[in-house]
Image (tube, grey):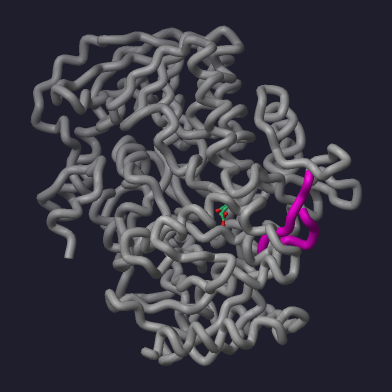
Amino acid sequence: MNLLDTSKEAVNQSRQERVTQKIQSLSPMEQEILVHQYHPDYKKEAYREIQFGPNQGEKTVHELADLLEADSPVADQNLSLTPDYSVDLLVIGGGGAGATAALTAKAMGANVLLATKLRLGDANTVMAEGGIQVAISPDDTPLHHYLDTLRGGHMKNDPALLKTLVEEGPAAVQWLIDIGVMFDRDLDGHLSLRSGGGSSKPRLLRCKDYTGLEIMRVLKDGVQNAQIDLLEFSPIVELLTDEEGACTGAVLKNIDNGRFIVVSAKSVILATGGIGRLHIQGFPTSNHYGATADGLSIAYRAGAQLTLQDTFQYHPTGAAFPEPIAGILVTEALRSVGAQLLNVKGERFINEMQTRDVVAASVIRECQEGRGITTPAGRRGVWLDLPLVDLIQGEGTLKNRFPNMVRQFSRYQIDITKDPVLVYPTLHYQNGGVKVDVDGESTVKNLFVAGEASGGLHGRNRLMGNSLLDIIVYGRRAGKATAERARKTDFKKPTLKHLDRFHQVQKEAGIIPTSVSPILFPDYVNRK
Ligand code: MEZ
């Protein structure tokens, strides 16, 4: 037997004796030390200062800084700005935040156009597995939810954004139920809740391990039934602004024929999602193919301030093996029902239900200090003991409650009811983003941002299930605010004046741009 098989066998052999094993949580001080030593957010050489613009002098990772300072794809196009469309609201992004905002604004009578890079529903929302976090059980309160999230975010969360999230969470989830989302229920018909890392109460509603997919199924039906105008395969490449710098629309690009599309709008909502496909610091990602930080660079060029742009979430359990699914999510919900993490010697090394940054840092530590397992392709990982779930919760739990996980591995002849799987942190979420107020408006007037592209709510580390709640609460708020604004606002002339300002500060910083952003798709051809 090779080392990998020997190590796996040791995990299989010790399973029974670990059923009742408890492992102490680290103290807050121990957590801070671990995170500072091993979490990728603290790797100095991965960061540099942003050289100009609203966040000049602040740090972010090289991959994002390069995009923020890159030129616009329309800078030298001599583009006619005669609008192809004029609408009250242009929503950019076909994931959960965009669909929710479009549905809300349309229901309030706004004339809405929804544009998306790929197809409606192609987004990180459908990749969310374990649940949506909301304080609805009788012994829970929005205050508990607030405090857990604040602790998880290292007290860096925007208090107003967080207060709104937890207070409006129950109504947002009721709206999802009303429009048709089928959350799992107990045998007596009550909504069933489970726990997430860093939460003091069971607070996660779920649809087996397909929660985001189920939510998106219903939102997508809603957009189609409401007959919201839809432009698919038409990503945003630039914003439009007026003389005062307020947003007046956007330039899209038709992917099929390469033509630009000019949209005049009273407001724009950017719901462009995350950043995973930049593969920051070489990490694999759990993210959707289109997650290339488009909204951040576009908003930044228009003068919008970013916040917490230096912090990212590396989900502790991305698949490390087999190679074709490296980086794909192995849901945290498995740990909440008993799955344990073990190193090459078959030893546990962390309480698996601590916050994600702490657990991810502990996995990296094990691998860096030679206690990881190397896969045939040379990746490193630790074991996630999944058969333990059936042993603790009863046979059939994995098959009945985690069908997605069972299928994901069975495609590669791995039976998770019998064997542990190898996992390693995967780039999962951008904790920060474009700074917004409680209606989702950025520091650029009439430019709203909803969902993962916005920043502040989650502090320096997001808790499980808070992103699904975020997209619904803030999708609804942005949809409502923009529909109301449309009633009081006239169309303003679309210009590219902000690019003149951008080029001016770029020049003053001594930068000659050699690339353009957004990149729209990951560059797998040239990537090392
Ligand atoms: O919120 C998330 O990121 C989530 C639900 C992930 C998971 O592990 O399932």
Q: Name the quarter where the C terminus is drawn.
A: bottom left
Residue at 55% x, 17% y is 105
Residue at 20% x, 28% y is 255
Image quadrant assignment for residue 276: bottom left
Q: Name the quarter where the N terminus is drawn.
A: bottom left
Q: Between 56 and 279, which is closer to the camera in this rendering?
A: 279
Residue at 32% x, 23% y is 232
**340 in magenta:** no
Horizontal and vertical percent position of residue 4: 41, 85
Figure quarter occupied by ligand 1: bottom right
- Give the main secondary structure, helix, strand or loop, of the magenta stretch: loop
**193 in magenta:** yes
Establish if 95 lies above or below 21.
Answer: above
Write the start and end of the magenta stretch as one range.
Answer: 192-202
Asked if residue 352 can be seen in this view, the reply is yes
State left or right for residue 197 relative to residue 252.
Answer: right
Horizontal and vertical percent position of residue 400: 66, 51
Residue at 51% x, 36% y is 450
Q: Farthest right residue?
A: 138
Image quadrant assignment for residue 121: top left
State left or right for residue 471 relative to residue 354.
Answer: left
Establish if 473 lies above or below 128.
Answer: above
Q: Between 158 and 180, which is closer to the camera in this rendering?
A: 180
